[in-house]
Amino acid sequence: MPSAVTLEAFVAAVESGAHAQAIEDYYTEDATMRENTAPPRQGRKLLVRASRRCSIAPPGWNHAACGRSS
């Protein structure tokens, strides 16, 4: 389990739009990601490339916010 400091740094990176950097910094080399009904993508390098492709989308298209519980 990551420390609270690490978790907050990850959330801040994602919320700021630095998705590819967050993947590089916090995901393991063999990480997987799945979008809805698409087959899973595996490998940090592939996930970073996919995230960078999304970063050229129109502003507001790829927004993330943490839904913290009270």
Image (tube, rainbow, N blue to C red):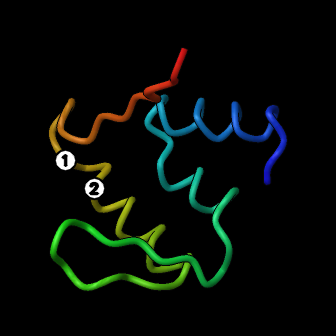
Q: Is residue 4 left or right of residue 15?
A: right
Residue 36 vertical position relative to residue 1 in the rendered view, above or below: below
Q: Nearer the viewer, residue 6 or 56?
A: 6
Q: Is residue 26 left or right of residue 6?
A: left
Please identify the quadrant where the C terminus is shown: top right
Q: Position of residue 50 (x, y in %)?
A: 35, 69
Residue 51 vertical position relative to residue 10 in the rendered view, above or below: below
Q: Position of residue 51 (x, y in %)?
A: 38, 60
Label 1 crowd bin: few (<14), some (14–19), many (20+), radius 10 Å: few
Q: Residue at x 63, y 62 (%)?
A: 24
How many numbered callouts? 2
**Which residue is situated farthest in the front direction here?**
70
Q: Residue at x 40, y 28 (%)?
A: 65
Q: Is residue 6 left or right of residue 13?
A: right
Residue 54, which numbered label? 2
Amino acid type at circle 2 is Cys
Please identify the quadrant where the N terminus is shown: bottom right
Q: Secondary structure at mark 2?
A: helix
Q: Quadrant of residue 39?
A: bottom left
Residue 28, which numbered label? none
Q: Position of residue 14 (x, y in %)?
A: 50, 39
Q: Quadrant of residue 25?
A: bottom right
Label 2 crowd bin: few (<14), some (14–19), many (20+), radius 10 Å: some
Residue 25 vertical position relative to residue 18 in the rendered view, above or below: below
Q: Whole-Å distance between the Cαs marked 1 and 2?
A: 5 Å
Q: Nearer the viewer, residue 56 or 12?
A: 12
Amino acid type at circle 1 is Ala
Q: Secondary structure at mark 1?
A: loop
Q: Residue at x 59, y 29 (%)?
A: 12
Residue at which label 1 appears: 57
* Label 1 with label 2: CB-CB less than 8 Å: yes
**Which residue is situated farthest in the top direction here?**
70
